[in-house]
Amino acid sequence: MAQDDPPANPDKSTEWAELRTDLAEDRSIMAMERTFAGWMRTAFAAIGIGLGFRALFGEWDPTWLPKLIATIFILGGGWLAVTAQRRACATLARLDPHKFEAISTPNFKVMAYAVATGAIVLSIGLWVLTES
């Protein structure tokens, strides 16, 4: 590519190196956002597995066993969401966006804590609102 050819002016070479470094940092931020989205999908999948397990195996004897297994998956999904948020915020604190605007940290926190709160409420409802 033409931009990969060494420039005649050494100052231009330094500018290109700095630009590439800045763009690499932007790509790292975008990769972190995609990773956060992947962790959130995994959290929702764990919650869904818990609900599905409870729905499919609710007639087991003892009746508390499917509830317990479902609760483990559901609370695990909430834990994954909070863990993903903490890692994303720590990464954002280390990186500076240059050419684009990253998602703000409060958006990560709102989503993660909403999922975690939902998982806790769902787990409580699983034990309180269902027949033993």
Image (cartoon, rainbow, N blue to C red):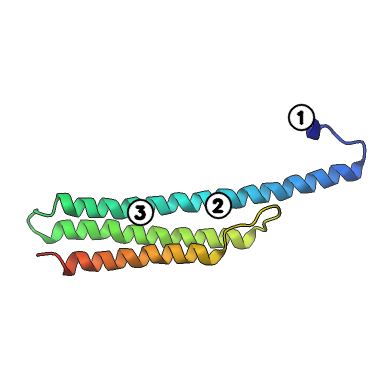
| Image point (33%, 58%), residue name | 76
Report the amino acid beneath label 3.
Phe
Where is residue 129 shown, x and y percent of the image?
16, 68
Q: Secondary structure at mark 3?
A: helix
Is label 3 or label 2 in front?
3
Task: Kindly report the distance in space between the C-alpha atoms of the residues bearing marks 1 and 2.
Answer: 28 Å
Q: Residue furthest left?
A: 61
* Residue placed under numbered mark 2 in the picture: 32
Determine which of the numbered discs, if any, sits on residue 75 in the image: none
Report the amino acid beneath label 2.
Met
Say whether residue 114 is left or right of residue 104.
left
Residue 54: image quadrant is: bottom left
Determine which of the numbered discs, if any, sits on residue 44 in the image: 3
Task: Kindly report the distance in space between the C-alpha atoms of the residues bearing marks 1 and 3.
Answer: 43 Å
Say whether residue 73 is left or right of residue 114.
left
| Image point (41%, 59%), residue name | 81
Where is residue 123 shown, x and y percent of the image?
25, 65
Q: Is residue 24 above or below residue 120?
A: above
Q: Residue furthest right?
A: 9
Q: Is residue 98 above or below residue 132?
A: above
Q: Residue furthest top?
A: 1
Nearest the viewer among 75 and 52 is: 52
Q: Earlier in the sequence, mark 3 or mark 2?
A: 2
Say whether residue 124 is left or right of residue 86.
left
Q: Secondary structure at mark 1?
A: loop
Determine which of the numbered discs, if any, sits on residue 1 in the image: 1
Report the amino acid beneath label 1.
Met
